Image (spheres, rainbow, N blue to C red):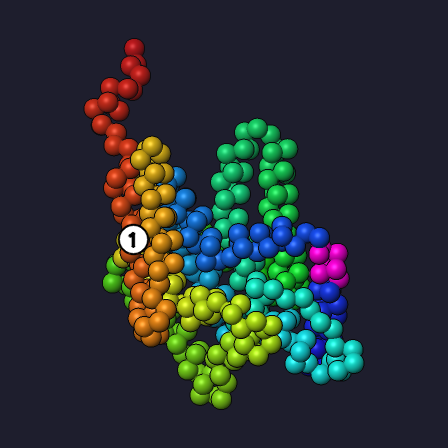
Amino acid sequence: MKLYSYILKREIFQILYVQDVFSRYEDFLALVTKAFDPKILFLTVIPLVAGLSTRLYSRLLLSVLLTEYFNTLLKWILAEDRPFWWVRETKEFTTLNRPKLYQNELTCEPSPGNPSGHLMTSTTYLYVIFSVLEEAGIQYGRTVVVTLRACYYLSLLLISVSRMYFGCHFLHQCIIGILLGVVMTKLTMSLSFEKYLTKLTRKRRLGYCCLICLVLLGVYWGQKLFGVDPQWSVKMAFKWCDDPFYLDPSTTLVFSIVRLTGSLVSFATVGPVLKSAPLDFRRSIPLVLVMMTMNWAAVNYTPRYYGVIIYYLYTFLMHLLFTYGYMRLVPAVASVVIDPRVQRNSRPKIN
């Protein structure tokens, strides 16, 4: 424990260094951390991909959902502090030498710190997107591929710096988030895994959804059984956040589980899409943009003052319906129908 506390203490000084060096770039770093918020990515990147390819949307959605579930599970199990409250609680510093970390409204996230959800989820998103870009750009030479990979690593570096700058994560939490994000992406994006899910019946896929929820519930109530408050991190955030109004209930682990479960149930109902007809972008993109606008409006009008049950039920249904719409409605409206007679006539004649 002494070694662990010593490491965290050194990492506090790293955060102070980052806050000092990058203070003039605060607005840019705020933009980075907002843009790669898992909730924001879920409401923007995934829907846009749905307008480009139903197949790619299915792969990205599955990878992101399972990665976020795994991140949530690890946060509860590891139960590690975030810098902005650890520095106030630890005995590694005294009243005379305790450093003061800079805070703003982006700092006060009420979930455990390890692994970083921003880094773990963003690694998945960016891995999928840059893989597609690399596949398309490989015909233009190795320079394009190297440039894309450099942009990928630079993006992860910028996200890590932004998370450290606002005192949300220690350095090791960012590194672990990146490594686990890569592992989860490679696992969930594998074709064999998708084919396995496709062979399952709808009832079996929904059964796996229930199993994931039961595991998370087991961890939640297991902590209570052993005298650990699963909401300890929320209390720590309230205690040490400079302004309690900075706290956002949508960043809690329970909210994340409800959001993810709504989308996962919808995905399990439809099933992985291994093959899909090409989309007519003149129809798919406008439709997706309209649905995204409706989704944002639905998020903004979430009923927050009618009790926890209504709040979570609304969140669950909202994500279930919109995910189903992106998987079913978009391809139903915007798929390009190829006339088999035209396809047959277009074959070259053999003399």
Which quadrant of the figure has residue 275? top left
Residue that carries the numbered disc 1 in the rendered image:
324
Residue type at mark 1?
Answer: Tyr
Observer-nearest residue: 343 or 173? Answer: 173
Q: Is residue 227 magenta?
A: no
Residue 130 in the image: state x and y as whole percent: 53, 43
Tell me the chief SS of the magenta region. Answer: helix
| Residue 209 visible in the snapshot | no
- Residue 95, relative to residue 107: is it above or below? below
Which region of the structure is painted magenta?
Answer: 17-23
Q: Dividing the image into 4 quarters, which one contains the C terminus?
A: top left
Residue 274 in the image: state x and y as whole percent: 34, 45
Task: Give the residue at x 34% y 38%.
Answer: 286
- Residue 344, relative to residue 31: is it above or below? above
Task: Give the residue at x 33% y 50%.
Answer: 294
Left/right of residue 22 with respect to residue 36 in the rendered view? right
| Residue 302 visible in the snapshot | yes
Left/right of residue 211 with respect to residue 233 in the rendered view? left
Task: Give the residue at x 68% y 81%.
Answer: 90
Q: Dividing the image into 4 quarters, which one contains the N terminus?
A: bottom right
